[in-house]
Image: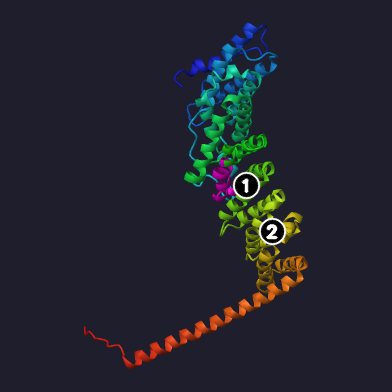
Amino acid sequence: MSNPKTLIEFFEKEKPLVPSSPTSGNEEILSTVSYCTFVFTFTDPSESPAQRDSKRLQLSRLIAMLKSSKKPVHEKVVGPLVSMIKANLFRPLPPPTNPSAISEFLDEEDPISIFSPLWSHLQIVYEILLRLVNSTDSKILRNYMDHSFLLNLLSLFQSEDPRERESLKNVYHKIYSKFVCDRSAMRKSMTDVLLNYVFETEKHSGIADLLEIWGTIVNGFTVPLKEEHKLFLMRVLIPLHKTKGMQVYHRQLAYCISQFVQKEPMLGGVVVRGILRYWPVTNCQKEILLIGELEDLVENLDPDQYRKLALPICTQITKCINSWNSQVAERALYVWNNEQFYKMATTGTVEVLPVIVEGVEKNLKLHWSKSVRQLTESVKVVVEDIDPDLYAKAQMDMKVKESEAHQKDIKRKKTWERIELAASKNQFVNPQRYICVSN
């Protein structure tokens, strides 16, 4: 702030809200834009709070002038306006407060630490940008909002301030809708961000927001789906299930994937196998989310795929039923209330039922939770009704397996006893010789 006196003069200068003529109106806007190009850091102690407030008032005056005008923004104003927006928005972002960038326990975060002090200015700048995009012809805008501008805008999704990401999401989606010729490039840029997150850093604050934009994009895809869109599903969306921070964006991810399966149900098999491949081992909260996603997918599957997918899906659900975490076990047991899941399970009865019977009987005997055992009793009634004879046979087979396993265990113990006895006799016959070393 080399010349604070001059800044005070132009920040506190009174300006009429409504111009008296188009020419004077444009001059008024250009004058205000030049004032707003100066950027405050909100961290420099030499910055005057009064000057910050004056800039906020100038930004408010600018958005008021843009909204009050019934005509589109004049082309000679667009350039300086975009330059002002770039000066305010495109800035180095502070390093993430959380080393992992996305916490698995968001409720424990201090929300104050992720709110930007710049927001009092940024909020109005985003409003100005959205107004400009809405009211200006795309051909004019594309002269000033080039590929570099869009990449810089995309990089701002790394901001930890959720208010900024929400405004950014609205602006970026509006630009995507309006810049038809740039849609492919914008999709590629967003894909690169997601791939870098999945396979490189697992650090990004805006994955949920980007997936929300992708949800509306996928919703607009025409059928049959293009090959590039299917590759996006297989190479980007499905691997997003494997990250540690999946809980943060799972709702948006599940919506994107459900849109693909609704448009082409045959993709359900690819999705199900992908989710099973990335199934968590120790993260119970992720398991609960994925059980729900599997249940939703079953409702959209092509019935022709039921027989192929019944065994892998039911095997995984049965493993979850046997989970020592009662929340996971209960969520898996509730899946049996789903009519489509029941239909799928009955299509492969001969292969599926023995797996389910083993899981059900194991729960009834061994699970520590009373509520889980009660729910398992209800599921047993449902499963037994599918084929009582097959259920009884599966029980008998399970008992035979248990008996064989018990016999093997006894045999193994006896073998070890003989080995230990032989080892002790050998030690008695050939005692170890110790050499005493005197001090």
Q: Which mark is residue 250?
A: 1
Measured Cα–Cα span from mark 1 to mark 2: 17 Å
Give me the residue at 66% from left, 71% from top: 362
Three-letter code, disc 2? Arg
**Residue 302: x, y in percent?**
70, 49
Residue closest to the far bottom: 429
Q: Which residues are magenta?
A: 231-247
**Residue 319: x, y in percent?**
62, 63
- For the C terminus, the image quarter is bottom left
Give me the residue at 61% from left, 80% from top: 403
CA neighbours of label 2 inside 10 A, class few (<14), some (14 to 19), many (20+): some
Circles 1 and 2, Cβ within 8 Å, touching? The answer is no
Closer-to-camera residue (335/152): 335
Closer-to-camera residue (311/380): 311
CA neighbours of label 1 inside 10 A, class few (<14), some (14 to 19), many (20+): many
Q: Is residue 193 magenta?
A: no
Give me the residue at 54% from left, 81% from top: 409
Magenta stretch, main secondary structure class: helix
| Left or right of 201 on screen, residue 247 | right
Three-letter code, disc 1? His
Q: Which mark is residue 32?
A: none
| Left or right of 265 on screen, residue 45 | left
Residue identified by numbered label 2: 331
Instruction: Classify 69 as above or below 183.
Output: above
Task: Count numbered badges in the picture.
Answer: 2
**Residue 222: x, y in percent?**
66, 34
Q: Is residue 235 magenta?
A: yes
